[in-house]
């Protein structure tokens, strides 16, 4: 019987922890003939790469910039992935590529694990695919009114469409103008790179911007500028590492049909981060 393969695709991808998390899961489940690798792939290469994959492939994890680009290439898309306009997981089944989104459940699980329920004022930084998944996760908690901070509203049209599908009222704020300091926030979710967080982190440090809880999808390096400022200000801080682990667990379950060993995956990823010198 041929070995079963899986991979994570994206650009850049060398930093990804997904191979460590998935491989740890396969070993814990006894799937010794399964392998998982990282493959550098951008939007232009994606159609050709998918066409080369045969029946020995179980599925793929997708990261930037492929979560939206993959949708027209799939045979079927689950309702949630269609609603948020992003698939971070594709499964090969019966010769067809099926698209799923585990980011939404991953973020919701990370919030539950930290005993944080978005209520009242919620702000999301960024307007990309991960921000769309954040809207869906917040909507699951019952919050239907969210502020989204972006640098250019013209680039956030996909998010506006997703919000309408979810029944979420979105108010846009200017990420660069300091408009977030107008009120205290219950939960702040950052989906932007740490290199773009300096202005927001500065507002937190000066006390102009406050949030009971801050979720930063970044995890390597850690802490991000925003996470460091929020922790110093007394906010509860959730690392993107928790989102990563929970969304990866969802992918493992889709690919293998078995319950993911979340604790094993978390420990393996933390050990790898320590090896890289990113002690947490």
Image (cartoon, rainbow, N blue to C red):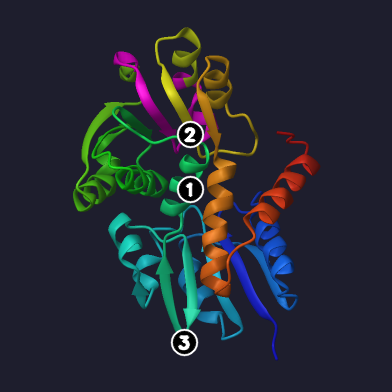
Q: Can residue 189 be seen in this view?
A: yes
Residue closest to the eye, 211 or 29: 29
Residue closest to the eye, 4 or 25: 25
Q: Measuring 44% from the left and 14% from the top, which residue is drawn there?
A: 203
Q: Which of marks 2 and 3 is nearer the N terminus?
A: 3
Q: Can residue 10 be seen in this view?
A: no
- Vertical position of residue 134 compared to residue 22: above or below: above
The residues bearing labels 1 and 2 have C-alpha atoms spaced at a distance of 12 Å
- Write down the residue under mark 2: 215
Q: Position of residue 158 (x, y in %)?
A: 27, 49
> Few, some or many C-alpha atoms within 10 Å of disc 1 (few <14, some 14-19, many ≥20)?
some
Q: In this view, does 86 lie to the left or right of 12?
A: left
- Write down the residue under mark 1: 109
- Vertical position of residue 232 compared to residue 65: above or below: above
Q: Position of residue 189 (x, y in %)?
A: 42, 34
- Vertical position of residue 209 compared to residue 128: above or below: above
Q: Which mark is residue 95?
A: 3
Give, as a single range, the part of the protein colored magenta. 181-200
């Amino acid at each position: 019987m041929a070995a079963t393969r899986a991979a994570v695709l994206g650009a850049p991808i060398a930093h990804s922890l997904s191979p460590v998390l998935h491989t740890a899961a396969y070993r814990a489940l006894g799937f010794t003939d399964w392998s998982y690798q990282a493959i550098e792939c951008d939007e232009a290469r994606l159609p050709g790469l998918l066409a080369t994959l045969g029946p020995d492939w179980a599925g793929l994890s997708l990261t930037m910039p492929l979560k939206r680009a993959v949708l027209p290439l799939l045979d079927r898309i689950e309702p949630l992935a269609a609603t948020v306009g992003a698939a971070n997981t594709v499964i090969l089944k019966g010769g067809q590529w099926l698209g799923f989104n585990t980011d939404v459940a991953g973020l919701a699980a990370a919030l539950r694990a930290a005993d944080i329920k978005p209520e009242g004022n919620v702000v999301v930084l960024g307007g990309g695919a991960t921000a769309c998944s954040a809207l869906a996760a917040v909507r699951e908690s019952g919050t239907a009114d969210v502020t989204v901070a972006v640098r250019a509203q013209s680039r956030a049209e996909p998010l506006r469409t997703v919000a309408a599908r979810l029944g979420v009222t979105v108010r846009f704020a200017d990420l660069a103008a300091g408009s977030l300091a107008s009120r205290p926030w219950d939960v702040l979710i950052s989906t932007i790179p740490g290199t773009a967080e300096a202005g927001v982190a500065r507002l937190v440090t000066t006390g102009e911007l406050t949030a009971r809880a801050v979720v930063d999808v970044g995890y390597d390096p850690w802490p991000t500028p925003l996470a460091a400022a929020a922790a110093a200000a007394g906010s509860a801080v959730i690392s993107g590492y928790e989102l990563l682990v929970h969304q990866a667990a969802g992918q493992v379950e889709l690919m293998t049909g078995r319950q993911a060993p979340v604790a094993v995956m978390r420990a393996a990823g933390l050990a790898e981060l320590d090896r890289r010198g990113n002690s947490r």
